[in-house]
Amino acid sequence: MAETVSGRRFLFLALPLLAALGRGPAHAAAQELRHPPARIGVIGAGIGGTSAAYFLRQKFGKDVQIDVFERGEVGGRLATVNVEGRYYEAGGSIIHPLNLHMKHFVKELGLSVPHSQGGLLGIYSGDEFVFEESSWYVWNFFKLLWYYGLNPVRMYLWVEEILDKFMRIYRYQSHDYAFSSNEGLLHALGGADFLQMLNRTIDEAMQKAGFSQKFINQMVTPVMRVNYGQGANINSFVGAVSLAGADSGLWSIEGGNKLVCTGLLYASKAQLIPGTVISLEEKTLQKGRTGGTVKRYEVTYNSTSGLTTDLYDIILIATPLYRKIANITFRNFSPSIPEFSQPYHQTVATFVHGHINTTFFGYQDPSAFHLSGIFTMENPKLFINSIGVVSPVQDKMKELQGPPVWKVFSPQPLTKEQMDLLFSSYDSVEVKEWLAYPHYSPPEKCPPVVLHDRMYYLNSIEWVASAMEMSAISAKNAALLAYHRWYNKMDMIDQEDLHERLRTEL
Ligand SMILES: Cc1cc2nc3c(=O)[nH]c(=O)nc-3n(C[C@H](O)[C@H](O)[C@H](O)COP(=O)(O)OP(=O)(O)OC[C@H]3O[C@@H](n4cnc5c(N)ncnc54)[C@H](O)[C@@H]3O)c2cc1C
Ligand SMILES: *[C@@H]1O[C@H](CO)[C@@H](O)[C@H](O)[C@H]1NC(C)=O
Ligand SMILES: *[C@@H]1O[C@H](CO)[C@@H](O)[C@H](O)[C@H]1NC(C)=O
Ligand SMILES: *[C@@H]1O[C@H](CO)[C@@H](O)[C@H](O)[C@H]1NC(C)=O
Ligand SMILES: *[C@@H]1O[C@H](CO)[C@@H](O)[C@H](O)[C@H]1NC(C)=O
């Protein structure tokens, strides 16, 4: 055919062809993939999986069937516990005012966000309080200045600068741009500096930026311990996210954060399939009488009706692929899917209805103790990360009768002896053990996002930072990536200089 067209015209035709060839394996499948996918499977109904279902529906339209597999409860790490008839956030609890996807979901789903009152906070070294808030705001400000000089103000600006760059993701995503790796995503937000953050601890990064060691030990480490159960040796990106989590204006959802997940599932018109996914396998099927083949993913799952299999065009994995969390076997993949052995960190949340033992924290006179939250420094003799009064997810403002409910975070379940030290008296106790977030140990390398041609791994982003909003960002990225790769719109993936380009576009 080529000889019947003029040279120039040939060049025109050849260019897109060459470009397509350059894209590797996707090209071979391009012809077959022009039609919309029939079925998409999502594994996990936490905030990642349910927001993925929502974004997939937006991109792929109303005709595709979207199935969401869940072996436990919708919400995953967003869950509540019942203490004396009232419910409390047991997993992910606070949302930052600039978490725009979460904000959008709440608005879209008609959920409400009550104002929560903050109590007074103290930082405990294991021997004494190194800092205690008073109810007089101005006094706190001067105390901070006196103790730490300009460190607190500079920290605020330092986090703000990172947050500013991070916010670029919403612009990129609203223009439909996607990234095939989390390193690529980070680079597009803040260049090599952002990538470098995965290679440094928050301690190193803040030292380099001129913060005092005293400030890091007494203010930064305690915040890391309460948010991620680990000290200032976590990577500096998740460290900065954690510090942003100490901002003002944090919120949560009336009735429980998990309501976002059930709401998104409903809004996406996805089908929830209760069951445990056991294995995934790529299958090559004959396409009708005309010959030719088509590739599908076979999902094997265990439900009340026994072992079942189903075929999907596209798969999104929205759970950590750590064997102790989701033990999924990948069969007959070429190239094979690597083993993800980077561990998750255990954090135990203990809810106690009772009176705190103020003597344990050095207060002989209980009536002088006014703190409702205690953060802790690194100290081997401490068996808790933090302890604080929590409000129920409903009717926050309604006065509770009797003692408050305390939430204790610790690396191990508390023993009877430890409980008797922490509390002078208590009745109800509820314990929730989590493999809560990655066990960070920089330099961090994120697992791949593209596990196979049409199979995507959302929770890779947790190695950058684990948070509700991060899962939602990853979900939108995966939905966009799945869409662009399906329709071969490679110019929407891994674009350089998006920040500059989108700025000049408007
Ligand atoms: C104690 C604690 C406190 C936290 N605090 C905050 C906070 O204040 N703010 C914040 O933003 N984030 C917080 N986080 C982190 C946040 O909760 C998580 O990053 C987020 O909820 C992860 O959502 P996800 O959907 O990616 O994963 P998950 O919520 O873990 O969802 C995965 C789902 O997949 C299901 N699943 C797993 N394997 C299979 C299988 N084989 N078959 C079928 N289903 C399967 C699971 O049951 C689960 O429901 C906290 C986490 C914990 C544990
Ligand atoms: C981070 O460290 C890894 C090695 O662990 C290295 O390959 C990578 O280039 C480093 N990245 C940056 C931005 O320094
Ligand atoms: C499937 O679930 C049933 C009941 O929960 C259990 O007995 C069985 O061992 C499970 N099968 C597999 C392969 O996990
Ligand atoms: C994962 O499942 C395989 C069988 O599918 C089993 O042999 C293995 O013990 C399981 N691992 C864990 C950690 O549960
Ligand atoms: C409270 O803490 C003190 C000091 O650790 C301890 O001696 C005491 O046994 C604890 N319990 C009560 C009920 O006071």
Image (tube, grey):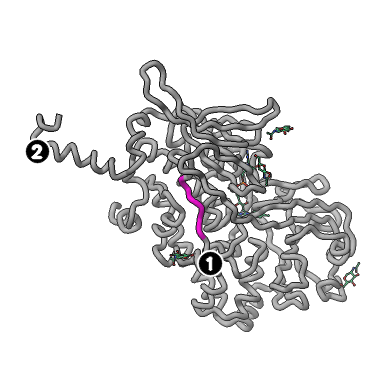
User: Which one is in front, 220 or 27?
Assistant: 27
> Which residues are drawn in magenta?
445-450
On whether residue 393 falls in the magenta region, the answer is no
Q: CA distance from mark 1 to mark 2?
A: 55 Å
Q: Which three-letter amino acid code belongs to the residue tagged 1?
A: Ser
The reply to whether the residue tagged 2 has its Cβ within 8 angstroms of ligand 2 is: no
From the viewer's perspective, is the residue at label 1 or at label 2 nearer? 2
- Side of 311 relative to 308 (left or right): left
Tell me where residue 57 appears, x and y as whole percent: 48, 34
Do we see residue 474 in this rendering?
yes
Q: Which residue is mark 2?
A: 7
Q: Write down which quadrant ligand 2 falls in.
A: bottom left
Q: Report whether residue 106 is seen.
A: no
- Quickly name the residue at label 1: 236
140 is higher (above) or lower (below) than 302: below
The rendered magenta stretch, by its main secondary structure, is classed as loop
Amino acid residing under circle 2: Gly
Q: Which residue is depicted at the point 69% across and 72% down?
A: 378
